[in-house]
Image: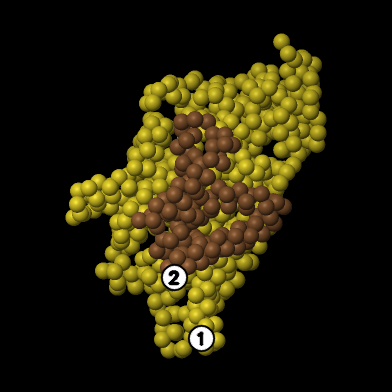
Chain colours: A yellow, B brown
C-alpha cells in the first residue's frame, strides 16, 4: 500500500518538480550572464539594454508612456515613442514599487521572461501531443540550448525585446492552439490579451501568427452556432485587440509605415541581409541536434494527419525567417535576422520528438524503465554539456561597458545640472551609455575622437568642430509629435555639425596618454578662451561648464 | 466533497505561489540582496491572476504556469491602456492589479453561485 502510494506521489510530482528545476536553473543562468550590478549598469553590453532600462526609469518617474524622454528627443517633451510599451511598463511598475535600479530590474525581468519559455514549450508540446514525457524532454532541451553563446546572444547583448517578445509570442501560440482546439470564451479572451500584449511589446513577431489568427477568425465566423453565441465569441476574441489598436495603432502606423526603412520592399543578396548581424542559422546547432531534427521532422511527416497544423506553422515560420528577409524592407529585415535566435524554439522540440519517438520509446518498450527517469538522465547530460560553455561565456562577458566611474560622472550630470542642458561628450561613445546623463547629449564617436587626436599630434592644430551627432531616440519616430488622434507634426532635427563651445557642459575622459594630452588642449581652449569652469574632476572624467550669460 | 476539493486546490495554488516566490526570491536575492523585487512581482503579476485560474479545468501545474504568464501579459497591457489616456502614478500601479484581483474574485463568486 505504502509503496503504491509512494509511486503515485512520485508520478504526480516528478514532472512538476523537474520542470521547476529546469525553470529556476534556466532563470539563474540567464540572469548570471547579465549579472546586474547594484551601483552601476556595469555588465550591460549594448545600447538596447541601457535604452530600455532608462526608458523604464523615465516612465516610473514621470508616468509618461507615450513620448520619448526629452533628453532622448533633443529636448522636446512630446516626440511620440515607438518603443515597446509592454516591457518598459513591466519594468517601470517594479521600479516604482521597489525603488531598485532600473538596469537590474530590466535585466532580471528579461531573464525571467526568457526562462518562462521553458514551461511554455512544455505547455505547447503537451497541448499538441498530449504527452507529458515528450513535453518535458522538449522543455529540457531549452534550458541551455547549445552553443549557448549563439542562442543567448539576444539575452547578454541586450536585445531584450526579442527575448521578451519570444515569450509573449509563445503565450499567443499556446492560446491560439487552445482556441483552435476549443473555441471557448476563456481561450478566446486570453488569446486576445496575448496578441494585444505582443502588439505593444514586439509587433513584428505578430507575423508568425497573423495568418493563423485570420483562419481562426474565419472559423469563428463560419461556425455553426446560434448567431448570438457567434457574436459573443467574436467579441471575446476581438474586444481587447480592438481597444489596444484604437489606442496604439495611430502611433504604430505613423512610426513605422511612414518610415521608408520599414515600408520599402526590394530584393537583397545574402550578404546584404546578414550585414552587421551576429546570429547563426540552422548550422549553429551541431550535428547531433541536426540529425535528431531530421528524424523528428520525418516522424512529423509520417504523422501528417495528426500534426498538419504544426507542420504548416513550422514551414511558414522557416519561410518567414529564411526567405522573407530577401525581400522585406531593411528595417524589418534587421529584426527578421535577429529573430534567427528564435530557432531553438522551432528546432529543439522537433529534435526532442525525434529522440523521443525513435530512441526513448524503443528503450522503454524493450526495458522496463520509467520514461521520466530516462528524460531526467538525458536532461542532466544536456545541461552538463552546456555548463562548460556557460562558464566560458560568463568569463568572456565579465568586462564592464559602463563602469562605476563613468556612471558616477554621468549621474552627476543627471542630478546636478539643469534638465534641459546640452551636453557634449568627448569620450569616444561606444554604445548608448550617454543615456545615463539624462541630458540631451552630443556624442563624439570613437572614430572621430581618434581622428581629432591624430590631427592634433600630426599638425599641432586643435579642431573644435565636430560631425558625429546627437545620441537620441527621436529619429526613430522621425521627430514627430501628435497634434490630434491621427494627425502629426514634425520637428526639425538639430544639425550634427557643431562647435564644441555651443554646449552647456563638456565632458572629457582621459582614456590614455595621447587622449589626455588632447583633452588638456581642449580644456585649455574652453577655459582660457571661452570662460568655461571645471565643475567635476573625478577618476578619469573632467566636466566643464559654460559661463552663464 | 466538491467544496473541500476546491478549497484544497486553492490552498495548493497559494502554497505553490509562495514556494515559487521563495525560489524566485532565492535567485533574485543572489543578484539584488533584497526580496523587494519578489514581493513586487508577486503583488503585481501573480496575485491578480490567482482568482481567475481558481477552479478552472487545467492541471495544477498548468494553472501555476498560466497564472504567471497571464499576469505578465495582462497587467502591463492594462497599464499601457491606462497610460495611453493619463499619466501613470503609484496609485494606478497599485490599483490596476488590485482591481484585476477583485474582479477575479467577483467573477468566481458569480460563476460558483450559478
Q: Is residue A265 visible?
A: yes
Depth check, front residue: B92 or A390: B92
Give the residue drawn at x 44%, y 84%.
A364
Query: Image quadrant of residue A263?
Result: top left
Neighbours of disc 1 within 10 Å: few (<14), some (14-19), many (20+): few
Q: Is residue A400 left or right of residue A137?
A: right
Count of all numbered marks drawn on residues in the image: 2
Instruction: List the residue tagged with mark 2.
Output: B1
Give the residue drawn at x 49%, y 20%.
A492
Instruction: List the residue tagged with mark 1.
Output: A4
In the figure, A292 relative to B67: above or below?
below
Q: Is residue A354 left or right of residue A501?
A: left
Q: Secondary structure at mark 2?
A: loop
Neighbours of disc 2 within 10 Å: few (<14), some (14-19), many (20+): few
Q: Are marks 1 and 2 in contact (CB under 8 Å)?
A: no
In the figure, A481 relative to A354: above or below?
above
Chain where mark 1 sits: A
Amino acid at each position: 500500500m505504502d509503496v503504491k502510494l509512494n509511486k503515485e506521489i512520485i508520478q504526480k510530482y516528478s514532472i512538476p518538480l523537474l520542470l521547476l528545476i529546469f525553470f529556476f536553473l534556466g532563470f539563474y543562468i540567464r540572469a548570471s550572464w547579465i549579472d546586474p550590478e547594484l551601483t552601476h549598469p556595469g555588465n550591460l553590453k549594448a545600447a538596447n539594454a541601457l535604452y530600455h532600462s532608462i526608458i523604464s526609469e523615465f516612465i516610473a518617474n514621470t508616468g509618461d508612456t507615450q513620448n520619448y524622454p526629452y533628453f532622448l528627443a533633443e529636448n522636446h517633451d512630446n516626440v511620440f515613442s515607438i518603443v515597446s510599451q509592454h516591457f518598459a511598463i513591466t519594468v517601470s511598475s517594479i521600479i516604482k514599487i521597489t525603488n531598485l535600479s532600473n538596469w537590474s530590474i530590466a535585466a532580471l525581468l528579461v531573464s525571467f521572461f526568457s526562462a518562462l519559455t521553458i514551461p511554455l514549450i512544455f505547455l505547447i508540446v503537451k497541448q499538441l501531443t498530449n504527452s507529458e514525457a515528450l513535453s518535458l524532454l522538449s522543455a529540457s532541451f531549452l534550458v541551455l540550448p547549445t552553443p549557448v553563446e549563439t542562442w543567448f546572444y539576444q539575452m547578454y547583448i541586450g536585445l531584450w525585446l526579442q527575448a521578451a517578445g519570444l515569450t509573449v509570442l509563445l503565450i499567443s501560440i499556446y492560446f491560439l492552439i487552445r482556441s483552435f482546439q476549443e473555441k471557448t470564451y476563456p481561450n478566446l479572451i486570453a488569446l486576445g490579451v496575448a496578441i494585444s500584449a505582443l502588439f505593444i511589446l514586439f509587433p513584428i513577431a505578430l507575423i508568425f501568427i497573423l495568418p493563423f489568427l485570420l483562419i481562426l477568425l474565419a472559423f469563428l465566423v463560419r461556425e455553426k452556432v446560434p448567431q448570438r453565441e457567434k457574436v459573443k465569441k467574436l467579441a471575446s476574441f476581438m474586444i481587447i485587440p480592438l481597444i489596444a489598436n484604437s489606442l496604439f495603432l495611430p502611433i504604430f502606423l505613423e512610426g513605422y509605415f511612414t518610415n521608408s526603412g520599414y515600408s520599402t520592399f526590394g530584393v537583397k543578396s545574402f550578404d546584404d541581409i546578414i550585414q552587421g548581424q551576429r546570429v547563426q542559422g540552422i548550422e549553429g546547432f551541431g550535428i547531433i541536434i541536426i540529425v535528431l531534427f531530421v528524424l523528428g521532422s520525418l516522424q512529423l511527416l509520417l504523422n501528417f494527419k495528426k500534426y498538419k497544423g504544426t507542420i504548416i506553422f513550422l514551414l511558414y515560420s522557416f519561410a518567414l525567417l529564411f526567405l522573407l528577409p530577401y525581400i522585406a524592407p531593411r528595417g524589418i529585415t534587421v529584426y527578421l535576422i535577429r529573430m534567427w535566435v528564435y530557432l531553438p524554439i522551432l528546432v529543439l522540440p522537433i529534435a526532442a520528438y525525434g529522440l523521443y519517438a525513435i530512441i526513448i520509446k524503443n528503450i522503454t518498450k524493450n526495458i522496463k524503465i520509467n520514461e521520466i527517469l530516462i528524460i531526467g538522465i538525458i536532461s542532466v547530460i544536456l545541461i552538463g554539456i552546456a555548463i562548460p560553455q556557460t562558464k566560458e561565456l560568463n568569463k568572456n562577458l565579465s568586462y564592464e561597458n559602463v563602469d562605476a566611474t563613468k556612471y558616477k560622472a554621468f549621474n552627476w550630470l543627471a542630478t546636478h545640472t539643469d534638465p534641459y542642458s546640452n551636453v557634449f561628450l568627448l569620450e569616444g561613445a561606444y554604445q548608448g551609455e550617454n543615456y545615463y546623463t539624462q541630458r540631451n547629449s552630443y556624442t563624439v564617436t570613437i572614430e572621430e575622437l581618434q581622428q581629432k587626436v591624430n590631427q592634433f599630434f600630426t599638425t599641432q592644430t586643435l579642431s573644435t568642430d565636430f560631425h558625429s551627432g546627437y545620441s537620441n531616440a527621436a529619429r526613430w519616430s522621425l521627430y514627430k509629435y501628435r497634434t490630434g488622434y491621427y494627425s502629426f507634426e514634425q520637428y526639425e532635427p538639430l544639425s550634427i555639425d557643431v562647435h564644441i563651445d555651443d554646449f552647456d557642459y563638456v565632458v572629457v575622459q582621459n582614456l590614455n596618454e595621447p587622449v589626455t594630452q588632447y583633452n588638456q588642449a581642449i580644456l585649455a581652449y574652453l577655459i582660457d578662451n571661452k570662460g568655461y569652469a571645471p565643475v567635476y574632476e573625478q577618476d578619469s572624467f573632467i566636466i566643464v561648464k559654460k559661463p552663464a550669460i | 466533497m466538491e467544496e473541500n476539493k476546491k478549497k484544497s486546490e486553492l490552498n495548493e495554488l497559494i502554497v505553490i505561489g509562495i514556494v515559487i516566490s521563495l525560489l524566485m526570491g532565492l535567485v533574485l536575492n543572489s543578484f539584488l540582496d533584497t526580496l523587494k523585487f519578489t514581493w513586487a512581482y508577486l503583488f503585481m503579476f501573480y496575485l491578480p491572476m490567482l482568482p481567475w485560474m481558481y477552479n478552472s479545468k487545467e492541471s495544477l501545474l498548468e494553472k501555476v504556469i498560466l497564472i504567471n504568464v497571464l499576469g505578465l501579459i495582462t497587467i502591463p497591457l492594462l497599464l499601457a491602456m491606462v497610460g495611453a489616456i493619463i499619466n501613470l502614478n503609484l496609485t494606478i500601479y497599485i490599483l490596476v492589479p488590485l482591481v484585476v484581483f477583485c474582479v477575479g474574485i467577483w467573477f468566481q463568486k458569480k460563476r460558483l453561485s450559478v
